[in-house]
Image: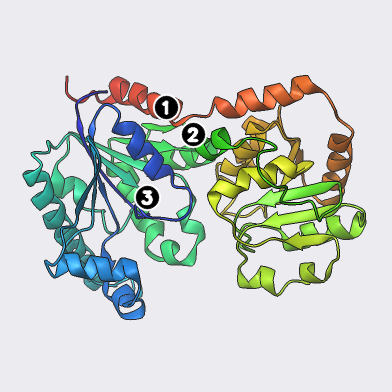
Amino acid sequence: MENLDIIIVGQQGWDTKIGSNCKDIAVQFSAANRVLYVNPSLDRITKWRNGKDKEVIEKLDVIAGKKNGLEKINDNLYVLNCDCLLESINFLPPGQIYNYLNRLNNKRLFKAIKKVTDSLSFKNDVLFNDSDMFRSFFLKTLLKPKLSIYYSRDNMLATDYYKKHGAYMEPKIIAQSDLCFANSAYLASYCQKYNPNSYNVGQGCDFTAFDEFVPGREEKKLAHIAYPRIGYVGVLTAARLDISLIANIANAKPDWNIVLVGPEDTSFQQSTLHQLPNVHFLGARPVTELPGFIDEFDICINPQLVNALTIGNYPRKIDEYLAFGKPTIATKTDAMEPFRDHVLLANDAKGYCDGIEKLLNEKDPVLIDERKAFARSHTWKNSVGMMYGYINKVNPVGT
């Protein structure tokens, strides 16, 4: 798929501090197509609550005409801050008032996008929607693209904010899209309930920081922590991670050191984990430092809660662990099934303890190489290539 114009709308701004599937997909699209990446527009409540934030001030300057909202990232990729302010309406109950204001928000967004696409002479080839089920609900009708794609990378309806209106709106936007792509079999199955042209395209992993890491070049980060080190890297949030599971492992194996690298939510900050001598919190660290921590782990873990929010999530961090060839154990979920040949799966603390014990005694270099090769097969080039294949099969564009 080449020489097309692709408009991307979604939930994450280009300057997001966390990993973003949508950004990685945009970069891959831009290798052979022109791409306009539309940042989420400012809404009234965010303006009121966070009016002093740098990001909000920049968007207000664009709305006021003091600053150009269009930024060129490379020859084919543009990022847009729209010159419109949207109404904050999620508090409203379903009904006519909500529908009217949501359509109004969509029209404002459309006008802001259309102004820029006209200036860039963008064709109406492809609209790619990264789960933006409210603000972009009517964009297919308004922009009239030759092809509309809905991308599901998370079970958004497991959160209260999205469940309120998303329970009836997401099925509709999935159904009206020409194609739906998902990053796991679980989410693809969900989309197929409403649109038969729904496919699991997996996802890629950005290994740039890992490629740049040279073992032994930097000072050891965990020299103060004794072996064995059982490690986790990522956001520490009780919505996704099982605090009691981590505590049970730590209590059952006091000679193991559990190392947690990442920012904590309130539940983690107030948990009894901080009272356990063999649990070490190292706080949020720059992405560039994470490979160094993983390199010093003996075993990597992903102690997820199994709930509606996590069961279908693609485990990006597992690819990062395996890229180093690290022995890894994770909670058994539907999304982990494709990894079972390279990752031990467990259901409870006993399963974790038994599995970690097994991995600590494993020294097979062949398994290390197999883990690395498996992780490296998960590239954005491959994932987007699968998208291109389904597009050409179901609804070829530009032919």
Single out the mark in the foreground, 3 or 2: 2
Secondary structure, mark 2, is: loop
Q: Which mark is residue 131?
A: 3
**Which of the marked residues, 2 or 1, is nearer the chain's N terminus?**
2
Residue 233 appearing in the image: yes
Q: Position of residue 68 (x, y in %)?
A: 15, 58
Q: Nearer the viewer, residue 251 or 63?
A: 63
Q: How many marks?
A: 3
- What's the image's color scheme? rainbow
Which quarter of the picture shows residue 368? top right
**Which of the marked residues, 3 or 2, is nearer the chain's N terminus?**
3
Q: Nearer the viewer, residue 81 or 133?
A: 81
Residue 315 appearing in the image: no
Secondary structure, mark 1, is: helix
The residue under label 1 is: 381
Check contact, mark 2 vs mark 1: CB within 8 A.
Answer: yes
- Using the image, determine if residue 55 lies above or below residue 35: below
